[in-house]
């Protein structure tokens, strides 16, 4: 009986010790193979993760040296990445890929147009270094409330970086590339040059790029001849120029342009009565100085002071 009990206890001890020896084995057996396999999988996963991280850093980092942004100091871009995107889009829709653009120097753009675009798109343009963090925060808060990614907040420098070199997508990787390019643009180009390039490549309608092409298309005049109200309406449609037309009867364009025009008046950029009188004079009846022949004109000193103020406003602080 005692021998039987001892035999049963020995067999139980041996049985219950098997799992421990089984799990502890690393030289063979099912769980030994599984442990080795898990280690291999971890190494593989870590390798893939590091490879993807390196590829991401390489893809984003290359924009710190490429493209050559400094060339824009003297060279006018013939076609932007956004123009090429619109061409492909038009071809896919069965339309002609031809886009209309007429480059115009900054000095030949109406001061009203320059100021209206700044008011509408980037009122802190002269003071920031490429990023308006307060505007970006407001845009983010608006997106969170509406659960979308539609709000703006981008400065003119950011918009220029996107238009010149990137796609219109809003994914985080593209935004990171945009930030790098914006930083480079701000450090290589003067504010005046940034604004000149932007005004010449911005989209202003279906196949229409640049302020000169927009002025000719919508108002039959050059960019330098735009009135304050015309400039305000052109600036009002910039957020979505293919949806809204400067010459249409959209309530949004009407309200937005009046708001922009009101700011121009408030800041003394526009003298309403004088502006309205000049708009009513046919071009052929205007004198060489742009006034209306026999119409009363401002004193010479006032005109000189106004031109000096105009130049200061264009060049910024």
Image: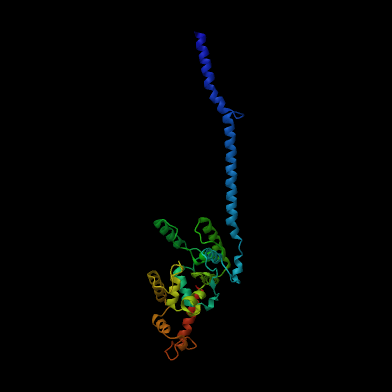
Between 115 and 56, the residue placed more toward the observer is 56
Residue 9 appears in the rendering: yes
Q: Residue 169 location, x and y as percent?
A: 51, 59
Residue 123 appears in the rendering: no
Q: Residue 278 location, x and y as percent?
A: 43, 84
Q: Residue furthest top?
A: 1
Q: Give me the residue at 57% from left, 40% from top.
A: 42
Q: Residue 90 location, x and y as percent?
A: 52, 66
Between 92 and 7, the residue placed more toward the observer is 92
Between 189 and 176, the residue placed more toward the observer is 176
Between 51 and 182, the residue placed more toward the observer is 51
Q: Residue furthest front?
A: 94
Please, which colouring scheme is shown?
Answer: rainbow
What is the total number of numbered labels drawn onto the structure image? Answer: 0
Does residue 41 lie above or below 123 as drawn?
Answer: above
Q: Residue 191 location, x and y as percent?
A: 53, 70
Q: Residue furthest bottom?
A: 294
Q: Give me the residue at 49% from left, 76% from top.
A: 217
């Amino acid at each position: 009986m005692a021998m039987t009990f001892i035999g049963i206890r020995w067999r139980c001890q041996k049985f219950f010790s098997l799992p421990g020896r089984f799990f502890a084995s690393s030289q063979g057996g099912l769980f030994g193979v599984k442990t080795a396999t898990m280690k291999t999988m971890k190494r593989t996963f870590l390798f893939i993760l590091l490879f993807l991280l390196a590829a991401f850093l390489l893809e984003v980092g290359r924009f710190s040296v490429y493209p050559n942004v400094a060339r824009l100091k003297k060279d006018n871009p013939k076609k932007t990445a956004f123009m090429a995107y619109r061409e492909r889009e038009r071809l896919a829709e069965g339309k002609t890929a031809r886009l209309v653009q007429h480059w115009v120097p900054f000095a030949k753009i109406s001061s009203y147009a320059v100021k209206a675009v700044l008011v509408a798109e980037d009122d802190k343009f002269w003071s920031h270094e490429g990023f308006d963090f307060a505007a970006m925060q407001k845009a983010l808060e608006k997106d969170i409330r509406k659960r979308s990614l539609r709000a703006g907040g981008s400065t003119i420098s950011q918009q220029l970086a996107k238009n010149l070199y990137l796609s219109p997508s809003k994914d985080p990787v593209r935004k990171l590339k945009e930030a790098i390019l914006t930083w480079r643009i701000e450090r290589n180009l003067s504010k005046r040059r940034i604004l000149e390039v932007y005004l010449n490549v911005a989209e202003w309608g279906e196949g229409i790029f640049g302020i000169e092409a927009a002025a000719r298309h919508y108002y039959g005049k050059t960019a330098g001849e735009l009135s304050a109200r015309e400039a305000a309406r052109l600036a009002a449609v910039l957020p979505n120029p293919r949806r809204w037309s400067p010459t249409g009867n959209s309530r949004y364009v009407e309200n937005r342009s009046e708001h922009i025009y009101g700011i121009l008046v408030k800041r003394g950029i526009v003298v309403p009565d004088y502006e309205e009188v000049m708009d009513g004079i046919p071009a052929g009846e205007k004198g060489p100085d742009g006034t209306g022949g026999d119409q009363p004109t401002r004193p010479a000193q006032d005109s000189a002071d106004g031109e000096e103020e105009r130049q200061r406003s264009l060049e910024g602080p």
